[in-house]
Image: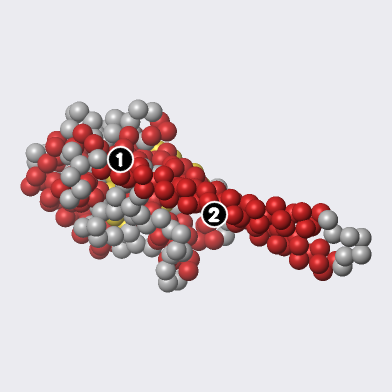
């Protein structure tokens, strides 16, 4: 029933966007007709005004079409009302976008970054994130590289940090870490020490950093004390280092406890990895955070009103 109601909300929102497109299209057609029936004696200023009107109307049509397309590409993913937003500014990404320079984002992590549990490469979170950012910044050159490798945690990730991450000269590194440390009973303090070293090396290379903490799923929840400690430590180091963190554990717990979604709604049968819907919602909310953070930094105050920040559909 929840999915059905959300689907109707998506459809109604899309219809509203389509109605707006129809109205703007009619205005555009009128402007074009007016421009093509100008007599030989019409002044240059009048022709210029008509041209500007036409260009403005066409731009409105394109914006309406982009908004409608985004509605259809977003999954019905409710806003996590009980989760605080912990994304900090992303100065390197914001600067590169403002200067129309290429932006490279690296998704670094283990199997949930690699995309285990998805039904195809296009449904992994890095590819979903890339598609969302492309819709938001259609003229920008944004590359999202997937550097996830199943079974790894901080010790293995640090061994390949230079080749897989730093040598790519990223502007933003989204580092998902900690889940396998919990499952393998690795020492949490030692894990965090490695994470801090990795953050230092990434920042020294000139990139922004966003951490992603473990997922809230049965396999992780069986080690509840270790999971809670890892989440706390990752959030603490993010605050101390003034970097972003996406609170995946809290977001997914909100899905299950507050939104009454069964684990099978967002994870596969192994009780650990996310499914297509889980990856889509995760990428969508993460993308919203990135867009809002960039918008706030570029404007100096608030993000544009059309930024889709945790928007319930």
Task: State the count of labels.
Answer: 2
Q: Which residue is mark 2?
A: 20
User: Could you tell me which residue is drawn at 58 percent across and 50 percent down?
Assistant: 22
Rendered image coloring scheme: secondary structure
Looking at this view, is 31 or 75 the one in front? 31
Q: Is residue 207 visible?
A: no
Q: Nearer the viewer, residue 18 or 44?
A: 18
Q: List x then y, in percent, for residue 126.
A: 39, 40
- For this rendering, which residue is in front, 210 or 310? 310
Q: Residue at x 9, y 41 (%)?
A: 223
Query: Is disc 2 in contact with disc 1, using a CB cutoff of under 8 Å?
Result: no
Q: Residue furthest right?
A: 40
Q: Nearer the viewer, residue 198 or 293?
A: 293
**Above or below, comparing residue 173 to residue 217 in the picture:** below
| Residue 43, position as x, y percentages in the image | 87, 67
Horizontal arrangement in the rendering, residue 253 relative to residue 147 (left or right):
left
Give the spatial CA distance, label 2 vs label 1. Answer: 25 Å
Mark 2 secondary-structure assignment: helix
| Quadrant assignment for the N terminus | top left
- Give the side of residue 1 with respect to residue 108, left or right: left
Residue at 53%, 51% in the rendered image: 19
Residue at image mark 1: 4
Residue 144 falls left or right of residue 264: right
Q: From the top left corner, tell me how far across and down residue 292 is, in percent.
A: 40, 60
Q: Which mark is residue 29?
A: none
Decide if residue 60 is in sight here: yes
179 shown above or below 173: above
**Quadrant of the rendered structure where residue 262 is?**
top left
Residue drawn at x 12%, y 41% as measured from the top left: 221
Q: Position of residue 39 (x, y in %)?
A: 89, 60
Secondary structure, mark 1, is helix
Residue 161, by quadrant, is: top left
């Amino acid at each position: 029933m929840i999915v059905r109601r959300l689907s109707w909300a998506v459809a109604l929102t899309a219809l509203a966007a389509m109605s707006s497109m129809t109205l703007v299209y009619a205005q555009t057609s009128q402007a074009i007709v007016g421009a093509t029936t100008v007599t030989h004696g019409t002044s240059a200023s009048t022709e210029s005004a008509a041209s500007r009107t036409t260009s403005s109307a066409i731009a409105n049509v394109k914006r309406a079409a982009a908004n409608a397309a985004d509605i259809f590409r977003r999954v019905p993913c409710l806003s996590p009302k009980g989760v605080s937003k912990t994304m900090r500014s992303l100065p390197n990404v914001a600067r590169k976008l403002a200067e129309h320079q290429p932006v490279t984002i690296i998704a670094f992590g283990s199997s949930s970054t690699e995309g285990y549990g998805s039904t195809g490469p296009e449904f992994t979170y890095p590819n979903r994130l890339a598609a969302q950012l492309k819709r938001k910044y259609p003229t920008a050159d944004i590359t999202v590289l997937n550097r996830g490798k199943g079974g790894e945690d901080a010790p293995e990730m640090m061994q390949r940090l230079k080749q897989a991450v730093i040598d790519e000269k990223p502007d933003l590194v989204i580092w998902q870490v900690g889940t396998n440390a919990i499952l393998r009973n690795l020492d949490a303090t030692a894990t965090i020490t490695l994470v801090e070293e990795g953050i230092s090396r990434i920042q020294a290379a000139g990139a922004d950093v966003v951490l992603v903490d473990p997922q809230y799923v049965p396999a992780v929840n069986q080690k509840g004390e270790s999971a809670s400690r890892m989440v706390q430590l990752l959030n603490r180091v993010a605050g101390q280092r003034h970097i972003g963190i996406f609170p995946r554990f809290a977001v997914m717990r909100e899905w299950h406890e507050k939104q009454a979604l069964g684990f099978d709604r967002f994870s596969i049968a192994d009780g650990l990895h996310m499914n297509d819907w889980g990856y889509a919602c995760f990428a969508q909310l993460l993308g919203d955070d990135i867009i809002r953070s960039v918008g706030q930094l570029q404007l100096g105050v608030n993000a544009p009103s059309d930024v889709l920040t945790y928007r319930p559909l």
